[in-house]
Image: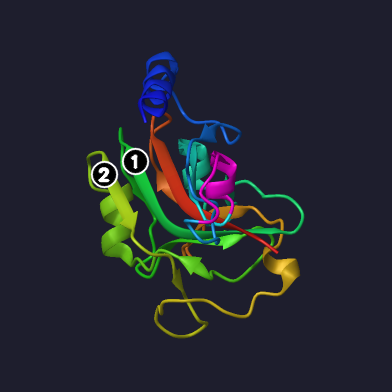
Amino acid sequence: MGGITKSLAELISTATPGTPDVADLLLFAPVPVTPFVTECKRTTVSDLISPLMVMKSSTRPLTDAEVIALPTTGVEVVPSPGPGKIRYPLAAFARLNWFADYSNIDAAARLTLQYAGLNGFRLAWDQTITALSALLASSQSSSAFASQVQFIPSGSGATFGDFGYADGDCVDKGIVLKINNQMAGDLAGGDPRNVLTVIVYYVEIEL
């Protein structure tokens, strides 16, 4: 027992602090999905992570010009994952570093997330003018949170969950931020110093 204790103490004292690498060894960690007693042995970080779906994030600052054009020109906020993979958003955060308000926000406008190439506003913040104006036209720096991305069926209110994506809609597709400003067109106002920072939290599904 003394030998084991000494070995662990030496390992801890000589270890370099930092983020573990997937190839790092974890002494006496159980191999996932196996009996603990019979398969308790040296395991890598990768062995422990591989069975799990890990939440990731992507951060994208938008310029004033990009914000103004969001009703007609979407901005990719999550890059495509590569062939055979889907990135599905779970939550999102937006913060406007404010210098001047935006205007021409339709009464039914909403901030949305959608897969690149789709026309429908399917992954969305279900926000009306009150929330969108609070973010973009409150005369101060403001934030908006989406605790769970919602499915917006055509012609109805928001519901949790999603369905009906063909592989061509979502596999190897980036996620785009837009504003559904109804028929009002692009926003107006703003200031060249305005910056809207968007963070999207998502999981990556390998098919």
User: Is 32 placed above or below 16 here?
Assistant: below
Q: Which residue occupies 52% across, 42% down?
A: 66
Q: What's the amino acid at mark 1?
A: Leu
The secondary structure type at the circle numbered 2 is: strand
Residue on which disc 1 sits: 96
Closer to the camera, 113 or 15? 15
Q: Quadrant of the N terminus?
A: top left
x and y percentages locating residue 89 in the rendered image: 50, 59
Q: Which residue occupies 26% across, 44% down?
A: 142
Residue 39 visible at all: yes
Q: Which residue occupies 59% across, 43% down?
A: 46
Residue on which disc 2 sits: 142
Earlier sequence position, callout 1 versus callout 2? 1
User: Is 31 placed above or below 141 here?
Assistant: below
Left or right of 123, for residue 157: left
Closer to the camera, 112 or 180? 112
User: Is 119 placed above or below 28 here?
Assistant: below
Magenta segment includes 39: yes
Tags 1 and 2 touching, CB below 8 Å: yes
Q: Which residues are magenta?
A: 38-50
